[in-house]
Amino acid sequence: MRNNIFAFGQLEQLARGKVDPHKSVFFEGNIVYWETGPLYAKNWKDKPYFFYTSPKREPVEWTSNFEADYNLYFNPTMPAYAADFNGRTWEEWQAAGKDKHSVWADPLFADPSRGDFTLSENSPALALGFRPIDLGDVGPRFRPGAQ
């Protein structure tokens, strides 16, 4: 998952149901903005697994089955140290190798409470490589004739 805006999830922001025996999630260059619920919910624990590079070689043990980096996280109701990164603090999460280049900062949306996620030209998300996207055709919307 790259270059997405995750905003105002009610139950949780990011949930993972199953831990696969390979690198199954690459979460990079995203903005996560929320006010309620946990940030990383459910199964975000790393689980070592063996990777076979060749049938004739011994397997290599990898210790991470997901990557997260270059993301921007922000909850206007709490400081970074109060956020729960799947049972870890922000510092512990980064020390474990996750989100090493990510930041906790206000993304400077135009008016998030009214659904306007247009970024200011000074948004720290841009320095992380986030590319603004056309928000006119994303997310839930009414379809004429739908019930």
Image: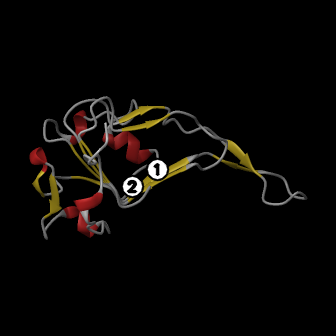
Furthest-right residue in view? 56
Bin the neighbour count of mark 1 within 10 Å (Cα to Cα): few under 14, some 14-19, many 20 and up: few
Q: Tell me the quarter of the image containing the N terminus.
A: bottom left
Q: CA distance from mark 1 to mark 2?
A: 6 Å
Disc ID at residue 118 = none
Q: Is residue 93 left or right of residue 6?
A: right
Q: Tell me the quarter of the image containing the C terminus.
A: top left
Q: Quadrant of residue 41?
A: top left
Residue kind at label 2, given as amino acid type? Lys
Q: What colouring method underlies this structural image?
A: secondary structure
Q: Which residue sits at x=69%, y=43%? A: 49
Total numbered labels placed on residues in the image: 2
Q: Which residue sits at x=84%, y=53%? A: 58
Residue 132 position, x and y percent, is: 26, 67
> Is mark 1 in CB contact (under 8 Å) with mark 2?
yes
Q: Which residue sits at x=27%, y=29%? A: 37
Q: Is residue 120 left or right of residue 86?
A: left
Q: Nearer the viewer, residue 138 or 44?
A: 138
Callout 2: SS: loop
Q: Quadrant of residue 7?
A: top left
Q: Which residue sits at x=13%, y=41%? A: 76
Image height check: is 20 above or below 70?
A: above
Q: Nearer the viewer, residue 43 or 60?
A: 43
Residue 121 position, x and y percent, is: 13, 70
Callout 1: SS: loop
* Pointer 1 residue: 97
* Pointer 2 residue: 100
Bin the neighbour count of mark 2 within 10 Å (Cα to Cα): few under 14, some 14-19, many 20 and up: some
Residue kind at label 1, given as amino acid type? Gly
Furthest-front residue in view? 145
